[in-house]
Amino acid sequence: MVATAEAKFSAPKIRQTNMLINGKWVESRSGKRFKTINPVNETVIAEVAEGDPADVDAAVKAARAAFESGPWSKMDARDRGRLMNKLADLMEANLDELAALESLDNGKPISDARAADLPLSIDCIRYYAGWADKLTGDTIPIRGNYFCYTRREPVGVVGQIIPWNFPLLMAAWKWGPALAAGCTIIMKPAEQTPLTCLRLAELAQEAGIPDGVINVIPGFGATGAAMVKHPGIDKIAFTGHYETAQKIMVDASTTLKRLTFELGGKSPNVVFADADLDAAVAGAEFGLFFNQGQCCCAGSRLFVEQSVHDKFVDKMLTSAKARRLGDPFDPNTTQGPQVDSDQFNKIMSYIDKGKSEGAKCLTGGSRFGNKGYFIEPTIFTGVTDEMAIAKDEIFGPVMSILPFQGMDEIITRANSTHYGLAAAVWTKDVQKAHRFAASVRAGTVWVNCYDVFDAAAPFGGFKMSGMGRELGAAALANYTESKTVTMSLG
Ligand code: NAI
Ligand code: MG
């Protein structure tokens, strides 16, 4: 008998839909629940407890107690690291389930969840587990007969508000440095995708991370706003839209909370004529269409040097047309649906704007199928810098190709945006590569590659793309305060 091809993955059992406060899985105090929807077929997956200010307050009390009276911030740092490594081991042991849950709730292809989201999330927790016992201060030679040193102490109770595009990975990016530093956490997952965060919190309990250290309150923007306004939270870390960050800054001003933001972008991906064009095409496809175009660092302004523009466009078209849309549980699918109807409608309205502003839609431009939030991979050429599709973050599978001529022109155009998250350059000329990397105002620059992420490499935005850095040693600064101690030596 001939073995059948790899079996299709299937939807996992939903284990947890309540909120986690002080180690207990509880209903919301109001009894309210909200639906999380499967973006493939628009059916309800589960109804999840929705947090109100009263739930946030209970979580703050738990997180405060776990912080003030231990054991978390007072535990031996090496033991904190050990528990974090245990969490990473449990994530690895439950990889199949977590990947399937992520694919179900978000709509991303399960092959992407298994190859990217899960390994990156696990690696992030392990990386920060290693930092727990390495947060050292300085000894400082000051004038006079004194001994002066600094300590790095946890900032306290932190509120973490995350989006729906990489639900589990964003939780890992936030929990890793916060836990390593000895902070306690109240996390609000995105309303579209709460399920993997809830499961991750169960695994954290199983790993032995003490009650109250991690609290999870699902809900909408109002739940997040209640966290931002709560005087018992010392810091807010947020990933999402810059307009939400603006509201958070206003709401946080009364308590002067520490704030870090990872926001969106309109990242320039620049292809010079001397580049390896096939590699650049593959990188441009990945850089824009990966995760259905729902990436903060998507290469959504694709600049191609005039002399190779037409050749590049032909290749790009072939590559976009070969994308496989369909059931995310099919391992051959490379593109799933957008996360929800709001995102679907927003993207379709940008496609309409692109057409009405005079760009040429070479492929795509329509809904795919008649169920779920699928959008065809779309390519516009003839795009100018003033068009809405070249200026605004679309967050969907919509590529804009813009011709350019020469280095000076491209640096000016790449930088004419209020965003500054990422940029990429494709060239075989090292001088061009370094000149571009030094001149572009962005927090990350990829040379002859795109979307290369590592837990050790800082990531974040210039300008309106963010404040502070995620990942690497840099993210530990988001979760620590420096204390200076000066002692008289008599
Ligand atoms: P959003 O910024 O509204 O939502 C992100 C998170 O913030 C969610 O957990 C949400 O519940 C929470 N939130 C919303 N309002 C809040 C408030 N006033 N106070 C505290 N928390 C609040 O983003 P949304 O509406 O989901 O997506 C809109 C657009 O934002 C997307 O089309 C995309 O352009 C951009 N975006 C960028 C992301 C990134 O990775 N940089 C991620 C998600 C969205
Ligand atoms: Mg919103």
Image (tube, rainbow, N blue to C red):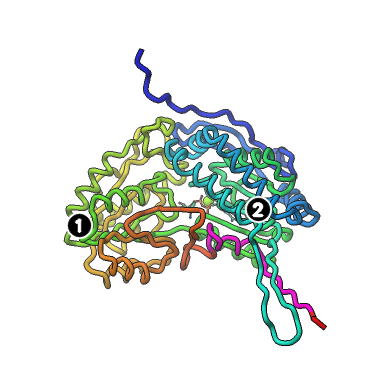
Q: Residue at x 72, y 44 (%)?
A: 21
Q: Amino acid at mark 1?
A: His
Circle 2 residue: 179
Q: Crowdedness of circle 2 by 10 Å Cα count: few (<14), some, many (20+)? A: many
- Is 40 above or below relative to 426? above
**Quarter-wise, where is residue 218 in the image?**
top right
Q: Is residue 205 left or right of residue 127?
A: right
Label 2, label 1: how far apart the Cα atoms are? 48 Å
Residue 424: mark in rendering? none
In the rendered structure, does residue 481 fall within the stretch colored magenta?
yes
Residue 31 appearing in the image: yes
Q: Residue at x 67, y 69 (%)?
A: 482
Q: Quadrant of the N terminus?
A: top left
Circle 1 residue: 309
Q: Position of residue 84 (x, y in %)?
A: 64, 47
Q: Position of residue 288 (x, y in %)?
A: 35, 50
Q: Is residue 132 left or right of residue 305?
A: right
Secondary structure beneath dot 2 equals helix
Q: Which residues are magenta?
A: 469-487
Q: Residue furthest top?
A: 1
Q: Residue at x 30, y 54 (%)?
A: 400
- Is 452 above or below relative to 256? above
Q: Amino acid at mark 2?
A: Leu
Q: Position of residue 156 (x, y in %)?
A: 71, 59
